[in-house]
Amino acid sequence: MPLSHEPAPPERRRRHGHRDADEGKAFEEFWEGPANRDSGVAAPRQAPTRGQPVSGASGGGPTAPGPSTGAYGAGPTAAGPRTGAYPNAPHQGDSYTADAYADDGYDEDYYEDEYDDYEGEEGEELSRRRGCRAVLITFGVLLVAAGVGAWFAWSWAQGEIDPSGEPGETVLVEIPDGASTSDVGHELADAGVISNATVWDWYIRFRDPGEFQAGSYRMQLNSSFTEAIDALDEGALPPNAILITVPEGLTLTQTLARLADPEDGVEGFTAERLQAALRDPASRSTVLPADQRSLEGTLFPESYEVEEGDTELVVVQRIVGQLDSTLAELDIQGRAEALGLSPYQVLTVASLIEEEAGTNEDRPRVARVIYNRLAEQMPLQIDATSCYVKNEPGGCSLTEADLASDSPYNTRNRQGLPPTPIASPGRASIEAALNPADGDWLYYVLDAEADDGSHFFTADYDEFVEARQRCAAAGLGCG
């Protein structure tokens, strides 16, 4: 069998390269034994063993002495037994002795060692690559998780530093003597000015606003940390000063009662002196028509400092002056003209919005319904105007007689606005009156499916009737 020019695979090389000594000896005896080589007598037939030649492949006796011309002898052969099909040395398929590869140029031990070394280095390199890849993937996952966690933590902290929504009611916060910046944070959190004293401690270390003075401060609920610090930087109220709050939606009579209240008002103030202060010409707002005697709607809802020695006249003029400065800031003169109204009429519309809207989102929509009805020359049919005339504390219950009266405040059967505002509107209602929402709505009623006091708006009367029936069925007083 011809040999390939390529070496046998390592597994086969190892198998062939370490043949038993007995097998090699048997092969050698076949070639060198005189009985087989010289006498021409065939060896006894026996079962072949690994390493022995197989005789009788084609039958026949020994050939005549003489040279051989090839694989097949040329010329006649003498009678006698033959040793095989071929005159040359027999071989067994796929069977080699160690001598067959004696000078093949390869050192078997070196070849195997080199192959094993190659296999080991390649395996170690592959293992290292896989290990590095696993470490990198794990590190990447941890890095992403840390980033996501940090983002959520930062977002939460930002919500504590600058909460959503507008600042709320003005309150008075007392900062005691010797209070640290951390103590100030706890005072503000307890009062509802800020939401989190712990985040305040962390924030204040980076901001480092310095020390705060002891005293009473005007602060607003739901303030951001920056707004709170700005309020503290403005300084404390003068000694013995108090803070009085005029809520939105109070009538003139209710506002005066609040100022004279022994507990919630200013100590020593009386209703009589407050009435006298209203009659002073210096107490009139700049938006009041010259022929309008009532100051209804002109006592602007806000929190005011009242210092020791301030009189009723001083406080009333301070309140009216705050309305004028707010209206000037909102450019009520120019924006009212764009709506085809006077500033005083806008103030009246704002008072209706203040009484009717249940949420801040409803305010510009209520304004649009009012303006749409005025444009259609429809009665406003806002019962709060009739309630204003009745002036009942703790709520209003209208009768058929009230709804049928010829009072100028009965918008059930009269077109146009009432003659005066019906309450003191806050800034949000004034802004809504100056900037109504876009829509064709003509009707609104409390939304029976909402739980926040908001209204259902529509331009279709049948839809309005259905919504009012749902409202009445829910017991919301919409019958």
Image (spheres, rainbow, N blue to C red):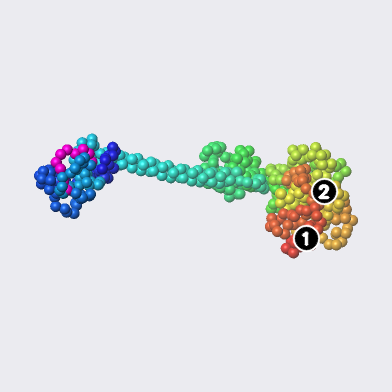
SS for tag 1? helix
**What's the amino acid at mark 1?**
Glu
| 43 relative to 297 in the view: left or right | left
Please give the residue where the numbered disc 1 appears in the rendered image.
466
Please give the residue where the numbered disc 2 appears in the rendered image.
372
| 326 relative to 208 in the view: left or right | right
Please state which of residues 82 and 5 is positioned toward the viewer in this rendering.
82
Q: Quadrant of residue 315 in the image?
A: top right
Label 1 CA crowd tier, 10 Å (few <14, some 14–19, many 20+): few
Disc on res. 240:
none
Please state which of residues 386 and 150 is positioned toward the viewer in this rendering.
150
Q: Is residue 205 above or below residue 254?
A: above
Residue at horizontal 55 percent and vertical 38 percent from the top: 207
Q: Quadrant of the C terminus?
A: bottom right
Q: Quadrant of the N terminus?
A: top left
Q: Position of residue 123 (x, y in %)?
A: 33, 42
Q: Is residue 179 visible?
A: no
Q: Is residue 442 visible?
A: yes
Query: What is the span of residues highlighted in magenta in the rendered image?
Result: 61-71
Please state which of residues 162 and 54 is positioned toward the viewer in this rendering.
54
Q: Quadrant of residue 73 in the image?
A: top left
| 374 relative to 194 in the view: left or right | right
SS for tag 2? helix
